[in-house]
Image (spheres, rainbow, N blue to C red):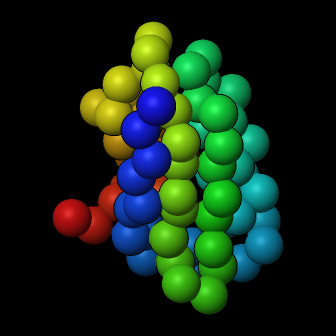
Amino acid sequence: MTTVTYSIPNISCGHCVHTIEMEVGELEGVHTVQADQGARTATITFSEPVTESEIKALLVEINYPIVE
């Protein structure tokens, strides 16, 4: 199991938090998603079959790209 925390500057409200948690949480292999509006981060715990690349691609698709 892997846990990553991403900086996502587009998080600006509760709706953003809900969208990220809902969309990323639907990926097979994602165990937890915790988005933080104040810190503008998302902490995601996942394992196979999902990959970090797939999570990043989904965040771009839903308009919440990460900043590395």
**Quadrant in the picture for the C terminus:** bottom left
Above or below residue 22? Residue 34 is below
**Residue at the location (66% across, 58% down)?**
34
Q: Position of residue 66 (x, y in %)?
A: 34, 60
State whether residue 48 appears in this view: yes
Q: Locate residue 67: give its quadrant.
A: bottom left
Q: Position of residue 53 (x, y in %)?
A: 29, 32
Find the residue positioned furthest to the front. 1
Q: Position of residue 48 (x, y in %)?
A: 44, 16
Above or below residue 31? Residue 45 is below
Total of numbered circles in the picture?
Answer: 0
Find the residue positioned furthest to the top. 49
**Residue at the location (45% across, 12% down)?**
49
**Residue at the location (53% across, 61% down)?**
42
**Residue at the location (47% across, 24% down)?**
47
State whether residue 23 appears in this view: no
Describe residue 44's horizontal placement relative to residue 54 as left or right.
right
Find the residue positioned furthest to the left. 68
Above or below residue 32? Residue 35 is below
